[in-house]
Amino acid sequence: MFVMQMAMASSFEKVSEKIIFNGEKIFEYRLSNGLRILVLPRHQAKVLSYGIWFKVGSVDEKLDPKLKKTGLAHLFEHMMFRGTTKYPDPMFTELTSRMGAEGQNATTYYYRTNYFESIPSVELEKLMELESDRMRNLKIIKEGFEKEKGAVVGELRRHLDNPGSVAHDELMALAFEKAPFHWNVIGSEDEIRGFTLDEANYFYRTFYAPNNATIIAVGDIEPEKLVKLTVKYYGSMPAQELPTIAMPVEPEQEKERRKEVRHPQATSELLMMAYRIPPITSDEVVPLSLLSTHLSTGMEARLRKLLVDTGIAVSASGGPSSQPDVYLFSVRLTENRHADQALRVIDKELGSLQKAPISKEAFERALNQELLSLYSDISENASLGSFLGENLMLSGNYLRGFEIIESYRKTTSLDIQKAAAKYLRPENRSIVVVKPQGKTKRASQPPKGDKAP
Amino acid sequence: MILKIGVALLFILAQLAQKTAFSAAEPPMLFEEDPSLLTTSIQVIVRRGSAMDPEDKAGLSNFLSRLMLRGTKNRSREAFQSTLERLGGALWVSTNHDTVVFSGKVIRENTAAFLKLVSECLVEPALNKQEFELLKREITSEISYSKNRNAQLVGWAFRRSFFESSPLERPVNGTLSTVKKIKHKDIQPSYRSHFHKNNLVFAVASPFKDTDIRKQILEMWNAFPDGRHVAPTVVHPKLSDRPLLIVVHKPATSTGSIVMGQPGIVANDPNRYALMLANFAFGSEAFSSRLFKVIRSDLGWTYAIHSTYHSLGSLSHQPSPFVIASTPSVEFTVKTLFKTWAMWKDFIENGSKQAEIGLGKESLIHSYPFEFDSAEKRLSYKIRHLLYEVPILSPDEYAKTLESITVDQIKKAVQKQHHPNRWVMAVLADKTVIEKQLDQEQKDLPDDKRLKIHKVLSPEEVIQ
């Protein structure tokens, strides 16, 4: 039921109160303008982690008829630190610094953008005032916009100097023909330099709306107090109509795709491949996640034993990622070794996994390593906030990560075998091999990372 | 300024400050108990690191410690690692110039069995020849692969020039030539030099009372022979009064990687807090420092630029360098270098402003609780206090210490510690691009006043 707050423009509703496996409680509320609040109280220290998550990322840009480009979601994340009328640049960062804010930053990915910091809990109200102010009253002016483009181009250049980042961009472009995962998150240099103030204003007014946002707080805070402050600082923000752009359906992949890329900074080969898999909401992701631990975690990981111990690779890993929904393998080859060698080894191992279940000991190892990883993820306020936020943005269910771990206990080695057989097939994959460029190269020419079809 | 830190923190800090000493009867054991923890973490700190490796076998400490994870006298590597990982545990090692640190973590219900395995690994490592050969190939492959990593290459090039002709000249994991010289017969003597009673410190963060854990650690410690701790040689780099510019030549980069450094301080330097405040204002604060505001926000030349005193958080007796690092777009590489240098000269000459230091004080005092807000962080502080006498101050003491420092004292501390021009500057980019930019930026200067490239290294030379 919605509770009316006197003298406030908004009301709120308590949606749920959930107990997670270690006995801690997560409270969920929603304001009448659509803003969602998740809060997990922890009082061991007088600090808390505060994050605000927007359900907008690079996939929302290219298909939007008012934008048709990629990179604004990320550039805009930078702009959010550039000041408002009340708190002009650099007051936001100075004031949060004065509070003693730790780990203040923001990130943009395909499907979401988040802003976060940890603060002494007594500073919460001031922080919420600042955060809500920049969500509504950002001053987007040409001078700051153009300067920030320079910093973002610097970030892009750094990305393009890294053969691994370029391999990932190329792999997604190869694996997805229609879905906007085809384009990298940061955009191309031309796109970044070409964004206009009108586009920035449209993006801000449309997507930085309360009905597209979730506040997640973990630490020394009582839920009622957080809700009261949220109503005070975010309650009067009007909900916005969000664009309803249908995500193109990516056609079933029917045959293997391959691409070779030469990179001027690479001195040895790099193999990356992506198998298409179902989304995180599917139960089939559960055995695929356990398989990833079997293949990639620890000294006993299969890929380590088969590729690193044999001298073929310096590192090797494989595991599921969501949005884009792919099972991603990454192998950094030893100098003078070739990607084809690694591919043959992986194919042989996947063939074995599809024919027979993994041993009881290997299953136990994978399960307990998953628990160790989960326990580490949730031990710190900031990492738990991030865990909840990612699950919410990916699946609409902030408890999804805990549900997957719980499902491990009902999963069998046979389920892993079946999932490997169903999804880790050559015709369901795309492969990118990065090779050194060789001797004929032009000096100071940035590598080409982003490729539109 | 009003302190906004809870009473609980005062209690924690009082406990932290209890001195743990080195004695003949038992090792230094540091504990943090937190019943809400779902895992137990252990650190075993060996007070001998890569600085004591033989000059032609640099990387030996790192090699030894990684080999120790590959099986024990009673279990093959596979048996050891699969048992440990089936427990929901992980054990890894990191080598520094003064220490080797074994770190482990396990789900809480398997704590006792995990500690037994850690003991087996440290007391009875197999150190066998077959694993030695496999590891040697792995480490040399990793070093070769570093040619793909520009930040690592330029860091190593900087280290080589900054610490020239000292044990700190080489990276902790050695270079291709020194690792190749390490023989299996070197391993046992190295193990004996590292692992004896007087070289070990134990630290555990756990949900349990320390009684049982203490007993297990004592059993482990008693299995080691007696020995004499050898204090590391402290290196004080001698730099020229003119900057030394090293270029790592890599064609076709779209960014330039810059690392520039001056002699830094040890963790318990008397001017620790004054220099911390100076660095906050100049380059360490993520969004408000001078470097960030000018080079990134105003000029837009780079995504990242910051400065740091490495020693403030590291496990080392060495006065680690004060370092500024940045990755500007390649066309702004030399501009960034000169602008940073000019800003530094101004900072040395004119000092910081009252407002900058006021912001620094407020920020550092208010963020102080984050130094102690988890069991693992409290443990880390205890370790640094024990090994390097890093002071543990109550929130009031910390606030008073920082509040009492004046802008003038900060300026004097910076001028005493630093020099306007005494830099080692390492840049990774195309050397022809750097040469052109140096000419362009210095076209109005006479030849003898110009910054010139002292040395050009190829990536192969850096890792050799």
Image (cartoon, coloured by chain):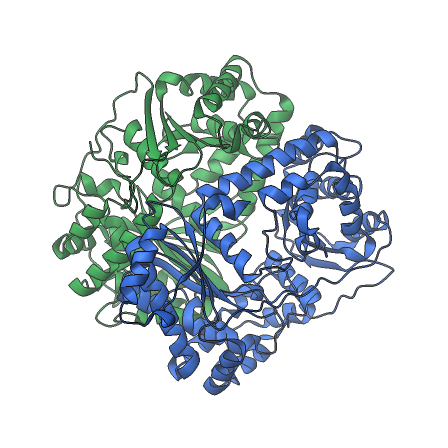
Q: In this view, does B410 lie to the left or right of B196?
A: left
Left or right placement of residue B388 versus residue A17 in this view: right
Extreme residue in the top direction: A355
- Give the chain ID for the green colour: A
Q: Give the camera-side residue of B309 and B59.
A: B59
Q: Which residue is drawn at 63% across and 44% down?
A: B178
The image shows residue B366 at horizontal and vertical percentages of 48, 72
Vertical arrangement, residue A439 with respect to residue A80, above or below: above
Q: Report if residue B361 is visible in the image.
A: yes
Q: Chain B in the picture: what colour?
A: blue
Residue B290 pos. (x, y %): 36, 71
Instruction: Report the front residue among B123 and A65.
Output: B123
Quadrant of res A49:
bottom left
A18 displayed left or right of A263:
right
Q: Is residue A231 visible?
A: no
Q: Is residue B420 above or below residue A296?
A: below
In front here: B343 or B397?
B343
